[in-house]
Image (tube, helix red, strand yellow):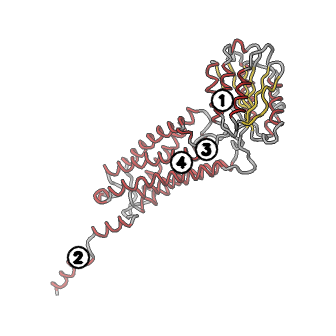
Amino acid sequence: MQRKINLLLFFFSLLGGGVAFVLGELLLSRRPYDLPSIVLVGIYFAIVALGVGLGCLIAEMISPRLNGLSWKQRYLGLSWKLLPLTLVLMLGVGVLTEFVYELNFGGIKPIKNVVMVIDDSGSMMQSDPDNSRYAAADALVRQMDEDNQVAVVTFSDESSVVQPLISLSSSANREKVSAVISSLQTTEGGTNISGALTEAMNVINSDDKAGRGAMVILLSDGFSQFNTATELNEYVERGIAVNTIGLALDDTSGSNLLLDIASVTGGQYYDVTDANRLGDVFQQIYDRLGDRTLLTERSDATADSPYYAVVRILALMLIGITLGVGLGIVFDNRHLAKSFGVGGAVSGLFAGLILEFGLSGHSYWDAIIRLIALLVLAAIISLFTFVVPVGEGRLSRRGERNAAASAPSSEGFHSPRRNRGSKGF
C-alpha cells in the first residue's frame, strides 16, 4: 500500500474530461430527439465517465504506475470489458439525481403559463417595420408543449387582451392563437408599460390554475414612467418572473427600466438590436421556462432556494463517488476504487459548489463553468491516490482466480527452506 501519483493519468483524465465537455455541450445545445432533461443529464454524465475512464485507462496502459505491471500483463483485457459498466452506473446515477432535483417540494408549481406582452406603439414602425415580433411570438406558440397555456396582451397608450389564457393541448387552440397573433398590426400611440403589466397580472388572476406557475415575456422599444419599487409587488410576492426584451433601444432609460423590471421579479433582460433575432430570443426564454437541471442555472421559483442548492451539491458528490468507484471497477482494483471513490466525494463537493455559485444563465459563461467543474472533478480524483494509499487487490472473482492461479503455491514457496533445513541436520 503506497501513496503515489501517475502524472500521465492526471493529464489524460483532464484531456478526457475536456473531450467529454465538448460532446456534452453539443448534446445540451442540440437536444436530439427532444430528450427529456432527466435522460439528457444521465447521458451527459455517462459521456463524462467515458471520457475520463478512457483517459485513465490509456494512461495506465502506457505507464501502469498505480495498478501495477501485473495488471497490464494479465487483466488489461478485463478492464476494457468493465469500462461499459462504469458508463451504465453513471447513466443510472445521473438519471436518479436529476429526477430528485426536478421534484417540486414546498408547494412549488412548475411554470406552465406564459403571458406575452407585446408593444404595438407607433415607434415600432421604425424599430420593427416588418412585424418580426409577431412572427417570433407565433413561432414560439407553435413550439410550446401541449401542457402549456398562453395569453397575448398588446399595448401602446392602452392595453388590450387579444388572447386570454388558453390551453395548447389541442391543435385547434394552437391555430386559434396563431391566427390572433397573425392579425395584429402596429398602432399609433405611446408606451404604457405600467398598464401593460397590470393587464398581464389580471390575465393571470383570471385563471385559478395559473397562480405561481406563470411567467411574463414583455417586449418594448420605449420608456414610460414606472415605479419598480411599488408596481411590481404582486409579481414579487407571487414569484412571477417578468422576462423583458428591449428592441433597438437607443435611450438608456428604456433599457435600464426593462433591466430593473426583470431584476426585481427574478427574470432576465435581453437587449436586441435587430428585430430578426427576436425569434431566437423568444425561444431562448421558453427553453429556460422553469429550467431546473443539475447542469444549468435555476430560473424558476427555486432560484434562491437553499434546499435545491444542497440537493445539487449532494448530487454532484454522489456522481463524483460513482465516477471514482467506476474507475476502480475498470481497473478491477478495490484499493483504487476506495481511493478514487473518496476523491470523487471531495471533487464532487467542489464541482457542485462551482456549479451552484457559478452558473448565471449566460450561455457562454455557463459553458465555461461546466468545463471548470468537469476538470476539477477529473483532477482531484486522479490525484487522490496520493492521499489514500493504493496497492494491488482484485475486485472481481475472475481477477482473484487469475491472481491465485498465477501465484506460486504455498508448498512450492516453502519447500526450498525445508530442504535447506533438512540438509543442515
Residue picked out by circle 3: 293
Name the residue type under label 2: Gly
x and y percentages locating residue 367 in the rendered image: 54, 36
x and y percentages locating residue 169 in the rendered image: 70, 38
Q: Distance between the residues labelled 3 and 2?
A: 60 Å
Q: In screen coordinates, is 316 left or right of 58?
A: right
Question: What kind of element bears circle 2?
Answer: helix
Disc on res. 140? 1
Q: Which callout, 1 or 4, points at the residue further toward the start of the chain?
A: 4
Residue picked out by circle 4: 42
Q: Quadrant of the N terminus?
A: bottom left
Say which of 110 and 175 sits in front: 175
Q: Which callout, 3 or 2, points at the residue further toward the start of the chain?
A: 3
Residue picked out by circle 2: 412
Say which of 30 and 244 sits in front: 30
Q: Distance between the residues labelled 2 and 4?
A: 51 Å
Name the residue type under label 3: Thr
Name the residue type under label 4: Gly
Q: Quadrant of the C terminus?
A: bottom left
Question: What kind of element bears circle 1?
Answer: helix
Q: In screen coordinates, is 291 left or right of 89?
A: right
Q: Which callout, 3 or 4, points at the residue further toward the start of the chain?
A: 4
- How many other residues sit within 10 Å of disc 4, few (<14), some (14-19) or many (≥20)? many
Disc 3 vs disc 1: which is toward the camera?
A: 1
